[in-house]
Image (cartoon, grey):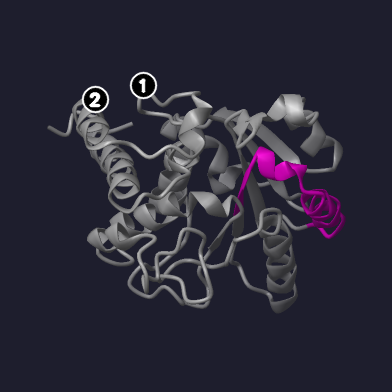
Amino acid sequence: MNTEAKQIIANIRQQLVEVSNKNKVPHLACSLSSVEILYTLYFHIMNIRPEQPDWADRDRFLLGKGHAAAVLYSVLGFRGYFAPEQVMTLGQNGSAFEEHPGKNPPPGVENISGSLGHALGLATGMAKAAKIAGSNAHFYALVGDGELNEGTNWEAAMFAPANGLDNLTVVVDFNKLQGTGRSCEIMQLENMEDKWKAFGWNTSRVDGHNVDALHEVLKADNIVAGKPRAIVADTIKGAGVSFMEDDNNWHYRIPTVEEVDAVAKELGLV
């Protein structure tokens, strides 16, 4: 990963911590686990025009784990959809930056996501419609491992390969924790890679914090004709902040001012 990428990723992490502290917004750790995934998609993979967010032929990203909306907003800001500073209104009355994306979201947000388990189904339907229309757009859905408790995901998982949706990619942010505990102790999720493969998906498993590895598996060269693509990204909840990593208290906990300063030092920003 080059210096510029490291700087952008550090800035995104710092903004997530700062806005959580400022506006008392929870779900910080599950946003931190997705930073490199969204950075790679928006800065290196997706065919988009930030200055023209509704461009008809754009690739689409649909957020499943809607409680992690902060990371989507932050990545969109640093990618140029709007001024990054606007994200600091997250969760305030009247702000378009709602804790879960709502009906009037900021530019670049493609779906509302209050309830979990709908993004993959939406992306699957949109990918099918694009096939019918002859569009070359690609559809990406990010789902959390805890979100896979929802059966709607597995209906989409059966539909997509049956319809040859090679214009669809699902990325699983596999951080091994959900709000109430270890995700693999609550539901039988492993072997995650084999599950998607058994459903007929072109499947890969990757370190979800390694931008170069993510770029390699997400590039168009790895699309197999007639098959949707599933990428299981192994991540760490709270990644990038040593005292938050793999500590599920940070699913809801709000950082103090002193902890915000400590994060800035750890990220090399001061």
For the magenta stretch, what is the residue range? 141-164
Residue 236 visible from this viewpoint: no
The amino acid type of the residue labelled 2 equals: Glu
Residue at the (31%, 50%) spot, across then down: 19
Question: Where in the figure is residue 178, as x and y percent of width and height?
Answer: 62, 35
The amino acid type of the residue labelled 1 equals: Ser
Name the foreground residue: 143 vs 229.
143
- Asked whether, in this view, residue 115 is left or right of residue 5, the answer is right
Mark 2: few/some/many CA within 10 Å (<14, 14-19, 20+): some
Name the foreground residue: 174 vs 226.
174
Mark 1: few/some/many CA within 10 Å (<14, 14-19, 20+): few
Residue at the (50%, 49%) spot, across then down: 68
Work out how far the residue at label 2 is from the one at label 1, CA to CA, in angstroms: 8 Å
Question: Where in the figure is residue 147, as x and y percent of width and height?
Answer: 68, 45
Q: Establish if 41 lies above or below 133.
A: above
Position of the C terminus by quadrant:
top left
The stretch drawn in magenta includes residue 156: yes
- Asked whether, in this view, residue 9 is left or right of residue 166, the answer is left
Judging by the rendered image, the residue that carries numbered circle 2 is: 266
Q: Count up the numbered dots.
A: 2
Numbered mark located on residue 242 in the image: 1
Q: Establish if 245 lies above or below 121.
A: above
Q: Disc 2 vs disc 1: Cβ atoms closer than 8 Å?
A: yes
Q: Establish if 166 lies above or below 5.
A: below
Q: In the figure, residue 91 lies in which quadrant? A: bottom left
